[in-house]
Amino acid sequence: MEIGPKGVKLSVIDIKLSKDRDYDYSLKADTAINTDAASLSYQSEKETHDAIALLMNIIKTKYGIASKKTFIVISSGLKQELDKYNKVDYFANVIRPKDLDPAIQISYVTAAQEAELSFMGIVPQKNRYNTDQLDV
């Protein structure tokens, strides 16, 4: 689950190891709830909190995904906005549903980390040394 400036995005991905030792990814769900998180208002914080709770319920009931395989990340774009007001930790605590498993952390990524993770998720391992990526 990614919390970005515009809202909360859920991606459920099935990962399997192929015969040639590459990972095969299958997208099972991809949905978003617009909460305008970057506005940093009481309303947007509540809507983001509620969106996380709703999407976590879907993760548990529809897909049966264990907490240890669930990740919630504040995007680099939202983190940059939160950094302006020194509110990253505050925001992560406010949007965290009370019944969320303590094993699930709400973390954040920097722009460099986000680029690296994006590249790793998009480009197959066998092509990583001869491929470039441009984020527009």
Image: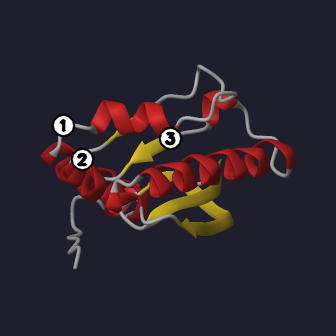
- State whether residue 29 is above or below residue 40: below
Dividing the picture into quadrants, the one containing residue 85 is: top left
User: How crowded is the residue under tag 3: few (<14 C-alpha within 10 Å), some, or many (20+)?
Assistant: many
**Labels 1 & 2 near each other (Cβ < 8 A):** yes
User: Where residue 95 sits in the image (x, y, percent)?
Assistant: 50, 40
Which amino acid type is shown beneath numbered disc 2?
Leu
Dividing the picture into quadrants, the one containing residue 69 is: top right
Which amino acid type is shown beneath numbered disc 3?
Ile
Quadrant assignment for the C terminus? bottom left
Q: How is the image coloured?
A: secondary structure
Number of the label disc, if any, that sits on residue 95: 3
Mark 3 or 1, nearer chain start? 1
Which amino acid type is shown beneath numbered disc 1?
Asn
Q: Which residue is mark 2?
A: 82
How far apart marks 3 and 1 lie (CA) works out to 16 Å
User: How crowded is the residue under tag 1: few (<14 C-alpha within 10 Å), some, or many (20+)?
Assistant: few
Mark 2 or 3, nearer chain start? 2
